[in-house]
């Protein structure tokens, strides 16, 4: 006979072959194998889900245990008279054993096939149950947990006279005492080890987590439920959060497989009648919901139960503990979202939560999740989303973000969202202090932690950067996407942009502006001129203490260049002439006239200045045409090409169900890069030492093929590529710090001792004037 003992009781001595058994009330050591995993006494009573009382056992050990000669014994809450049910057979590791007891008046459904049967009429509220390794009836009222032969003991209900530690909460006709951890948790404290929740009887055929359909059975180890489209009945769980159209609930008795989520959304269409901390059972149809409908065809689905029938079995039960993500908990993959699938992850048959970020987060869908001291890697968006990563994530920027790289798409990112509770206004580098807890959801191509309480934020202290002032003989050239600037914007935007140009960029000689709109913005009435837009910006710069700026641009053909409908965005050269810069005007450039390079005795010049590059090329369909201008600085000619390449609209999301994500927008950018590269090469073919600056919003990464095309053969140097990884970003999208804006120099300029700076004033801040950061290069041209 085996004996369980506490660490506070000396090992029993063996004297003349006899085992001396302690009989005091000291706490027991945890069981190495069989424990009582569930107790239910309301069987057959009014409202009961099952016709019979039962006691369930679980083998938490690693070897089978014979139950021959063992008994399950029962006594009333304060009694010392014990009834017995004999056990037979054995219980395998990780398996359950169901002991059916007496029936009530007949309410409820039959139990799963029992492994042993008795007739004990158990109390629905409070009593004592013992697992004994012999057939001798106990005689105790108190101290029973340490009586001879007792392998495990449960006192249920506050009036139980004996228990391991403290008794469980009081039960009812609709609740059972269910051991946590699927039956595996044993600290020898009944109050701590058991939850009072819906009964879920499991027999020896159930294995790890049977007893009818459970949430993890519905979720499965996959992106699509193995029960999709099927009816399920009496799925148990505890309500963890509610929304206007349903609620999330989670099984407090998880299985041992981290790939199967224990949480699920129940769609009720209108506000649900259940409340957080209700123990419920749900019947209905398993469904896969794709956010965005047909318009969200690249989104993953979320699993839910629709047309539900909901039974509340108890109120104010303990919520399942949240799963910690990060150090000390489940650690997400560090670099790979998905690399084992070519096609649809929902049907690929590949699901690896340790290697693939998209599978890792799927395995937590619908569950309570906790991030401790999460690092903010993107500013709070206008929708209330905060991109965050677990503390300690790598590849951070110098200011606290996280860098997007060709080999690292940052699968540890999750959006902390505000559908259930308000999120704070934060910037990159801030911290969500303490525990941030919510339920994990998915929409708009991202996994989202819908917080159930507002997080607390601590500032990381980043401030807008200020670049160095240009020295004498240095040409300061910048590029700045000012995000749909037009006269209908508030004056505060003009004043803010002016301050950034004057103070943060130190009033450059030349600024290539992108997304300058026409004089009435998105009003689509045929207006294409932008003189009012530019006049308002130039006046704001003067008011901010800046120099007098001039500008050159070409009005586009109405609604031909993409962007916001009616806005007619274009690139504009904004320049000052008081430091030696001059614009070379050559008339004739129009929206549809192609510029060209003129060779005059080995000296290149532009036919039109300003002029557009190859505007009839299909590469520029519904996209901004490059603006080329000729400048002189200190007697040196400099050719500048301002660009705004095709956007990434239409590309598939990083966390979408097609992997690897398709990026169809790249094709047009590759063609655009080819056209610009050809024009640059024409200049350099006349004079290999010509000064050429190609700059603007290229809408593609430093490691992209678009950039490769522009730099092929060494005719241009991409300045973002010259930075260290931690500095290589001009834009922050969904928490990924990345390069979209570029300055490239021809050999005649890149060979000089230039100074290059991305000036972080917008993209990392919740309060931003544009979603892009400007950048500047100071080139010595003495």
Image (spheres, grey):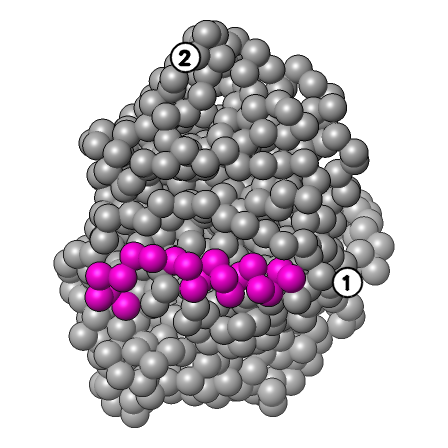
Q: Is 779 on the left or on the right of 251, as rendered?
A: right
Residue 22's disc number: 1
Question: In the image, which is nearer the foreground, mark 1 or mark 2?
Answer: 2
The image quarter in which residue 108 lies? bottom left
Is residue 421 in sight in this rendering?
yes
Percent coordinates x, y for residue 61 in the rendering? 54, 46
Q: Is 658 on the left or on the right of 752, as rendered?
A: left
Percent coordinates x, y for residue 577 in the rendering? 63, 43
Is residue 698 in sight in this rendering?
no
**245 vs 17, nearest the viewer:** 245
Vertical relation: 553 (above or below) 273:
above
Q: Which residues are magenta?
A: 523-542
Badge 1 density bin: few <14, some 14–19, many ≥20, Cα 10 Å: some
The secondary element bearing badge 2 is classed as strand
Residue located 49% across and 62% down the image? 535
**366 vs 291, nearest the viewer:** 291
Percent coordinates x, y for residue 766 in the rendering? 58, 63
Label 1 vs 2, first from the N-terminus:
1
**9 vs 274, nearest the viewer:** 274
Residue located 62% across and 60% down the image? 541
Distance in Å between CA atoms under marks 1 and 2: 105 Å
Asked if residue 341 lies in the magenta stretch, the reply is no
Residue located 36% across and 52% down the image? 569
Residue denoted by label 2: 599
The secondary element bearing badge 1 is classed as loop
Q: Do residues under tags 1 and 2 come within 8 Å of each other at their CB atoms?
A: no
Query: What's the magenta bit mostly, secondary-structure-wise?
Result: helix
Percent coordinates x, y for residue 51 in the rendering? 27, 79
Residue located 46% across and 81% down the image? 276
Q: Where, quadrant-wise, is the C terminus in this rendering? A: top right
């Amino acid at each position: 006979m085996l004996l369980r003992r506490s660490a506070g009781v000396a090992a029993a001595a063996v004297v003349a072959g006899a085992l001396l058994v302690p009989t005091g009330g000291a706490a027991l050591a945890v069981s190495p194998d069989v424990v009582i995993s569930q107790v239910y006494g309301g069987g057959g009573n009014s409202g009961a889900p099952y016709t019979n009382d039962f006691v369930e056992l679980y083998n938490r050990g690693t070897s089978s245990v014979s139950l021959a000669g063992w008994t399950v014994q029962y006594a009333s809450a304060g009694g010392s008279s014990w009834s017995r049910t004999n056990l037979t057979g054995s219980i395998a590791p990780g398996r359950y054993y169901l002991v059916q007891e007496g029936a009530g008046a007949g309410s409820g459904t039959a139990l799963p096939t029992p492994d042993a049967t008795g007739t004990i009429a158990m109390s629905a509220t409070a009593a004592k149950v013992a697992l004994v390794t012999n057939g001798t009836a106990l005689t105790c009222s108190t101290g029973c947990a340490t009586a001879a032969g007792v392998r495990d003991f449960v006192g249920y209900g506050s009036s139980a006279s004996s228990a391991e530690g403290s008794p469980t909460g009081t039960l009812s006709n609709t609740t059972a005492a269910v051991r946590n951890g699927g039956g595996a948790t044993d600290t020898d404290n009944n109050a701590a080890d058991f939850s009072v929740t819906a009964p879920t009887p499991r027999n020896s055929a159930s294995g790890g987590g049977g007893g009818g359909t459970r949430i993890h059975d519905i979720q499965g180890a996959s992106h699509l439920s193995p029960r999709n489209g099927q009816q399920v009945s009496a799925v148990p769980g505890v309500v963890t959060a509610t929304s206007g159209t349903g609620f999330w609930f989670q099984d407090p008795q998880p299985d041992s497989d981290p790939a199967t989520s224990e949480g699920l959304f129940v769609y009720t269409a209108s506000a649900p009648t259940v409340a957080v901390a209700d123990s419920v059972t749900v019947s209905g149809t398993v469904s896969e919901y794709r956010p965005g409908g047909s318009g969200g065809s690249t989104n993953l689905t979320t699993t839910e139960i629709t047309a539900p029938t909901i039974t509340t079995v108890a109120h104010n039960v303990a919520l399942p503990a949240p799963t910690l993500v990060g150090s000390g908990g489940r650690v997400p993959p560090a670099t790979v979202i998905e690399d084992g699938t070519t096609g649809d992850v929902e049907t690929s048959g590949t699901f690896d939560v340790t290697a693939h970020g998209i599978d890792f987060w799927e395995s937590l869908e619908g569950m309570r999740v906790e991030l401790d001291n999460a690092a903010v890697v993107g500013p709070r968006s206008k929708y209330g989303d905060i991109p965050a990563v677990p503390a300690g994530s790598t590849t951070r920027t110098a200011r606290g973000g996280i860098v997007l790289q060709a080999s690292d798409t940052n699968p540890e990112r999750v959006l902390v969202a505000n559908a259930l509770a308000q999120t704070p206004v934060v910037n990159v580098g801030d911290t969500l202090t303490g525990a941030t807890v919510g339920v994990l959801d998915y929409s708009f191509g991202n996994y989202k932690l819908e917080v159930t309480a507002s997080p607390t934020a601590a500032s990381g202290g980043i401030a807008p950067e200020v670049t160095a002032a240009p020295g004498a003989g240095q040409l300061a050239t910048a590029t700045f996407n000012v995000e749909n600037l037009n006269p209908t914007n508030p004056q505060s935007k003009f004043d803010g942009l002016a301050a950034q140009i004057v103070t943060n960029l130190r009033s450059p000689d030349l600024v290539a502006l992108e997304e300058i709109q026409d004089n009435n913005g998105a009003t689509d009435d045929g207006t294409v001129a932008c003189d009012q837009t530019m006049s308002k910006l130039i006046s704001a710069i003067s008011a901010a203490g800046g120099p007098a700026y001039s500008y050159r641009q070409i009005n586009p053909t109405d609604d031909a260049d993409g962007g916001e409908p009616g806005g007619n965005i274009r690139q504009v050269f904004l320049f000052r002439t008081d430091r030696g810069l001059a614009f070379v005007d050559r008339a004739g450039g129009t929206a549809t006239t192609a510029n060209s390079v003129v060779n005059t005795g080995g000296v290149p010049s532009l036919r039109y200045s300003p002029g557009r590059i190859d505007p009839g090329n299909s590469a520029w369909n519904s996209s901004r045409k490059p603006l080329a201008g000729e400048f002189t600085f200190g007697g040196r000619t400099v050719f500048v090409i301002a660009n705004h390449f095709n956007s990434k609209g239409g590309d598939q999301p990083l966390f979408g169900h097609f992997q690897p994500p398709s990026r169809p927008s790249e094709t047009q950018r590759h063609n655009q890069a080819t056209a610009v590269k050809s024009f640059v090469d024409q200049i350099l073919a006349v004079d290999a030492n010509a000064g050429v600056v190609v700059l603007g919003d290229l809408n593609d990464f430093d490691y992209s093929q678009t950039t490769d095309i522009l730099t092929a053969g060494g005719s241009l140097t991409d300045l973002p590529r010259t930075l260290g990884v931690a500095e290589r970003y001009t834009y922050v999208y969904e928490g990924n710090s990345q390069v979209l804006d570029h300055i490239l120099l021809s050999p005649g300029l890149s060979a000089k001792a230039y100074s290059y700076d991305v000036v972080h004033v917008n993209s990392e801040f919740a309060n931003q004037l544009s979603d892009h950061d400007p950048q500047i290069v100071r080139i010595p041209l003495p």
